[in-house]
Amino acid sequence: MSKRVLILTGDGAEVLEVYYPFYRVKEEGYEAVIASPKKKVLNTVCHDFVDGWDTYTEKPAHLLAADIAFADVDPSEYDALIIPGGRAPEFIRNDPDLPRIVQHFLDADKTVGAICHGAQVFLALEDRSYFEGRTLTAYNACKLEVESLGATYASETLHVDGKLVSGHAWPDLPGFMREFLNLLRQTTNKELSSSLQ
């Protein structure tokens, strides 16, 4: 049976941070499932860096069809989780079903990837002990949020801590997805070895 990867997002997701992982997961032969607060067509955005700006710019980007609403997600049916950045995380973290989904992946020690503003989603969890003593990175504007989780903010733009892969922003996607898929493959290989014994 094919591995299934859940991608949690919503309106305002950074287009590269959702489409790049979506297609890389499919390219590897896994099923990629887009989940959002409601099953609908989402509006993604393009963030870019402009000389002279202290922050980034934002423009409308591609549309993205969500496959399933958060309320209908059974996280036990998925092998790994990706949380893209953009503005979506600050809104989707308020959805009442989001904490139970994210908590499942952390409790089950499944591979979790969060890039850019994706780490904001973790603030929806009441139990912050998942992050105590851990290190992760995120877009530099999210440093205080990472530290409020009880985690150490990594200044490097890509960090792996156990099965938690974190990245700074969309320019880091090649390394982010390489590490994420390496962890997912390790899980697949272990399960295959167990089934052959």
Image: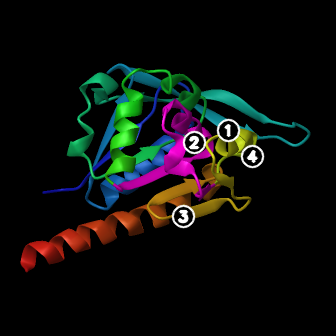
Residue to which mark 2 is pinned: 119
Q: Is residue 22 left or right of residue 144?
A: left
The nearer-to-camera label among 1 and 3 is 1
Q: Please indicate whether residue 151 sits to the left or right of residue 83 in the image.
A: right
Query: Mark 1 or mark 3, which has the lower sequence index?
Result: 1
Q: Which of 2 and 100 is in front in this view?
A: 100
User: Looking at the picture, which amino acid does disc 4 mark?
Assistant: Asn
- Residue 150 among those drawn in magenta: no
Task: Residue at 49%, 32% (x, y): give it.
Answer: 126
Residue 190 location, quadrant: bottom left
| Magenta residue span | 109-136
Residue 21 in sight = yes
Among numbered discs 1 and 4, the one appearing first in the sequence: 4
Q: Distance between the residues labelled 1 and 3?
A: 18 Å
Q: Whole-Å distance between the Cαs marked 2 and 1?
A: 8 Å
Horizontal and vertical percent position of residue 84: 51, 41
Label 1 sits on what residue type? Glu
- Characterize the local packing of mark 4: few (<14), some (14-19) or many (20 or more) Cα atoms within 10 angstroms: some
Disc number for residue 145: 1
**Kind of residue sitting beneath label 3:** Val
Question: Would you name the residue on which mark 4 appears?
Answer: 140
Say which label, 3 or 2, has the lower sequence index.
2
